[in-house]
Image (tube, rainbow, N blue to C red):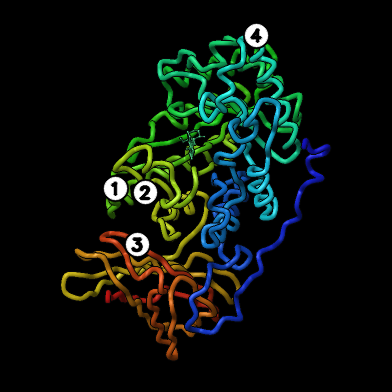
Amino acid sequence: MPAPAGRARRVLAATTVAVMGTLAVGMAVAAPSSADAGPTLGQLAAAQGRYFGSATDNPTLDNAPYTAVLGSEFNQITVGNTQKWMYTEPNRGQFDYTQADKIVAFAQAHDQIVRGHTLVWHNQLPGWIDTVPAGELLGVMRDHVANVAGHYQGEVVHWDVVNEAFEEDGTRRQSVFQQKIGDSYIAEAFKAARAADPDAKLYYNDYNIEGIGAKSDAVYNLVKSFKQQGIPIDGVGLQAHLILGQVPSTLRQNIQRFADLGVDVAITELDIRMRTPRDATKDAQQAADYRTVTNACLAVARCVGITVWDFSDGYSWIPSVFPGEGAALIYDENFAKKPSYWAVHEALGGTTTTTTTTTTGNTGSGCTATYRVTGQWHGGYQAEVTVRNTGATATSGWTVRWTFAQGQTVRSLWNGVLTADGQEMTVRNAPYNGRITVDGTTAFGFIGAHTGTNDTPTVTCATA
Ligand code: 9MR
């Protein structure tokens, strides 16, 4: 069903009901809505005139802890799979938007813009494509683009019109489109997308084009020739599936040269993979890498936003495709924020106050706790405590303690169980996050009140 006027289908934002202020001490509750929290990545990016988003996929929309983060932390969403051809046109001429519509509706309900992904790609195609005679494929491709981009007209800010059309050496990938239509298929796809949704920004998207090299040169030359010929193109997506410690040194320069051609640039699928398991050294390198990527985007006015390719290590494509690698994202499997999250947060202009860490533990085990004030406003604040297992075996439980020196209070706390005795706070693990693997982390957070001064307290951590 093509939407006659896409915006008519727009669902009004249903603000997440805030739970703060009504919870008894001692309860473990879900994370708060962004309305009560300190600045999110999306809010920080918006203050810089940009977006910070995440890809998502349909199976995770039923996962409440996941959607609590997805719906509050980001101001942009990319449809990770279900706008691809095999889902949207499973049979020739029969279109199905059931799955992708759910993600678009989620984004709209949370005031998030949507990047459409992707109209023409050699992968995740329905089987029938291979049976289309060469003379019919251009028409089939135009119909597909017209129908899908038409369905989402007005609801998608960017379309990845063509995805991954080049080989590493800069030659054309021999996809079914290249073989049966020829070089012109990319221009034809862009023209069809413009006709179907004149307001969407049209992107060419690819991987291994983050730095200057043969492949990014090929994309550069494509964009340049499109501009010269008046073929519509508005942006280049640098996927940025990167490897720990290997952010290309020419990233900023490369973004700038595309911008200088008169197109926008977006970091569209960012993740930075490592050999698993994580450890503190790798986490620190990853944080530095995320910071470098964020800063490179911020340095170029036409770099409009950054999207991570899902946000939690538990929902990443990496481990299934690169055995032994993973931990590529900014939240861990339990939705605790990783050092890479804080690096992005700071690069986007967020401030975190000083942290305090001390360690205690039983024989053979131990933990550290790091306390951060993540947001502060008149009379209130939000804080997060990251607990790291520094012992030699997995923890079965943990306890963090501190004493407030300036009359601060905790109003509600999530991902932990709080006992308050005057100014003395004791937080034990929630039933689901007592187990931390060696060198792994988990985190709890809370909202509280202060009377003007809110120094970070000294915290202690003990394992059970
Ligand atoms: O994240 C997607 C994964 O779930 C799919 O199995 C995979 C199929 O190839 O596609 C993944 O997303 C890709 C994206 O569409 C294009 N760039 C590379 C991404 C990771 O493979």
Q: Is residue 427 above or below residue 368?
A: below
Residue located beneath label 4 in the image? 135
Query: On the picture, is 120 further left or further right than 244?
Result: right
Point 31% across, 76% down: residue = 460
Q: Earlier in the sequence, mark 1 or mark 3?
A: 1
The one nearer the camera, 173 or 225, is 173
- x, y percent for residue 172: 49, 14
| Snapshot quadrant of residue 208 | top left
Residue located beneath label 3 in the image? 441
> What secondary structure is found at the residue carrying circle 4?
helix
Residue located beneath label 1 in the image? 276
> What secondary structure is found at the residue carrying circle 1?
loop
- Name the mark nearer the viewer: 2 or 4: 4
Within 10 angstroms of label 1, few (less than 14), some, or many (20 or more) residues? some
> What secondary structure is found at the residue carrying circle 3?
strand
Q: Earlier in the sequence, mark 2 or mark 4?
A: 4
